[in-house]
Amino acid sequence: MKKLKPDMAAVSAVPLNGKPLKKRIMDNWQLYAMLLIPVVLTIIYKYIPMYGIQIAFRDYKASQGMFGSEWVGLKWFQRFFSAPTCVRMLSNTLLLSLYSLLWSFPIPIFLALMLNQVRFQRFKRTTQTVLYAPHFISTMVICGMIRIFLSPSGGLLNLILGSSVDFLTESSAFRTIYIASGIWQDAGWGIIVYMATFSNIDTSLYEAAKVDGASLFQRIIHIDIPELKSIMVLNLIMSAGNLMNVGFEKVWLLQTDLNKATSDVIAVYVYQQGIENAKYSYSTAVGLFNTVVNIILLIAVNKIAGKLSEDTSFV
């Protein structure tokens, strides 16, 4: 890591507590100037477009424009909650997200812990590359591969099982297919941050533990996992922030009429209503509801994380 220049190091070492805001800014103006650019870009590209949210409360007609369309209040939200598929979509979205988080979150940690114990560097680098590779395959290609693997006529899985089942028409198999393919694609990529954390651990800790007679399992429990604790909580909070954002593209590409009982999720519904049926106000209302639920979940998880550890509260 590049060392800070002496003047920057001196600035970063200035204690901030107890000083008025103006004094802090004057003392650390370089850091605040660096922060200004991403804040401005975020406001321009993330917050200003939010004025379009109001069409969720209007009967938007393109001919009348956004501000000329009739104000209808919560009409579109009420229509969504009274839709016969509302409960199914909500439960599918939540279950698919929760199961994905439950299975996908710990696997990169286990892989990183195992790779960290490998001392043969060439094998270690090769294994990392093999694990990373699926992440760079596009979702469309992944879905095409899944359809080939699961094909009832000559698909790899059916050849192994000696069967001829069309798994993509089985609603009970959809969640397993979605989660397993997600782990295959992203688990290797997820270990990068954990491996980077391991590189910062002082190797003398391992030597001292070996001298004290600590086993491999004890070194993992008492050295590796505590070092990963903060980044694990950060990743958990970030994952919780996307809990309602089920990958639209993969669900859309793997969905069939026969597996809709488990694959009908809010993201696909928003696309169908907004793009295919041109119901812009309705789809915006559904998407806004999804976002609000996401924010509530993010704040809740962050509060829980903050209570578990004072160093891991990020919102």
Image: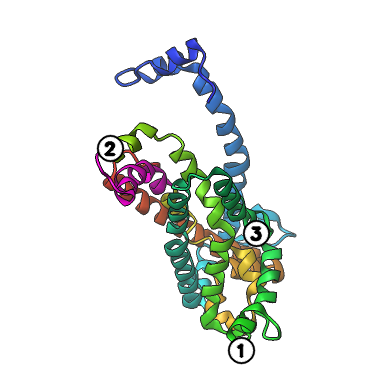
Quadrant (top left/top right/bottom left/bottom right) for the C terminus: top left
- Image quadrant assignment for residue 105: bottom left
Residue kind at label 1, given as amino acid type: Ser
Residue kind at label 3, given as amino acid type: Ser
Q: Secondary structure at mark 3?
A: loop
- Residue position marked by numbered label 2 in the rendering: 211
Q: Image point 64% across, 52% down: which residue?
A: 67
Label 3, residues with CA under 10 Å away: few <14, some 14-19, many ≥20 = some
- Residue position marked by numbered label 1 in the rendering: 163
Which numbered disc, 1 or 2, marks the residue closer to the eye?
A: 2
Q: Give coordinates of residue 247: x percent, y percent.
A: 58, 62
- Residue position marked by numbered label 3 in the rendering: 69
- Image quadrant assignment for residue 162: bottom right
Q: Earlier in the sequence, mark 1 or mark 3?
A: 3
Q: Give coordinates of residue 161: x percent, y percent.
A: 58, 84
Residue 230, above or below 32: below
In the foreground, 115 or 311: 115
Q: Give coordinates of residue 275: x percent, y percent.
A: 70, 66
Which numbered disc, 1 or 3, marks the residue closer to the eye?
A: 1
* Magenta residue check for 230: yes
Which numbered disc, 2 or 3, marks the residue closer to the eye?
A: 2
From which residue to which does the magenta span run? 212-234
Q: Earlier in the sequence, mark 2 or mark 3?
A: 3
In the foreground, 254 or 156: 156
Residue kind at label 2, given as amino acid type: Val
**Residue 166 can be seen in this image:** yes
Q: Secondary structure at mark 1?
A: loop
